[in-house]
Image (tube, helix red, strand yellow):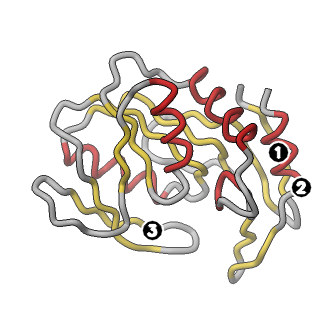
Amino acid sequence: MLDRLVQTLESCPIVKRGDYNYFIHPITDGVPIVEPALLREVCCAMLKVLDISGVDKIVVVEAMGIHIGSVLSVMTDIPMTIVRKREYKLPGEVAVHQTTGYSKGELYINGIRNGDRVVVVDDVVSTGGTLRALLAALTIAGADVVDVCVAIQRGTPDIGRPYKALVTIDVTEKVHVVDRNL
């Protein structure tokens, strides 16, 4: 299992963003194309490790969590809410600042109510900045975060709670899959 994910990671290009080696991959960037078989493999693997019992909503961060969350939502009939990088000024909207290894900005949560049981899914965790910010905002909104799963873990980031990752990678001049966590 995860053979496609591993193969595509270990052959994906690397670009420099300052001192940061940024890997470009269909799951994390949507380029060059997102093959259905790869997306299906990732989502099926996530469903094997995620605790979705009694979950009300799947929470994803735009942009690259959307394709994973959409497929999971269709597979499970659990509604999805997208944490946006743009403010909508809706009642109950929660804003939180996020800082990652290569960007910073605001995230806006809508559609989460006090007592909602949610799972968080995302494409990658590198520094943990986005997930830490998201978890803080979900707490403010009154959600109960049942589980967190990412497709790809880069290094050993701390997000303030346990989470699951399908694969763990190291990035030098290329991507090395150091662990299949399934």
Three-letter amino acid code of the residue under disc 2: Ser
Q: Secondary structure at mark 1?
A: strand
Three-letter amino acid code of the residue under disc 1: Val
User: Looking at the image, which residue is at 78% across and 53% down?
Assistant: 170
User: Looking at the image, which residue is at 71% across and 25% down?
Assistant: 182
- Up/down of 178 relative to 96, above or below: above
Instruction: Report whether 52 appears left or right of 38.
Output: left
Q: Earlier in the sequence, mark 1 or mark 2?
A: 2
**Residue under circle 2?**
11
Tell me where residue 81 appears, x and y as whole percent: 34, 45
Query: Which quarter of the figure is the N terminus placed in?
Result: top right
Q: Earlier in the sequence, mark 2 or mark 3?
A: 2
Tell me where residue 156 appears, x and y as whole percent: 64, 48
Disc ID at residue 177: 1
Q: Secondary structure at mark 2?
A: loop
Of labels 1 and 2, the one closer to you: 2
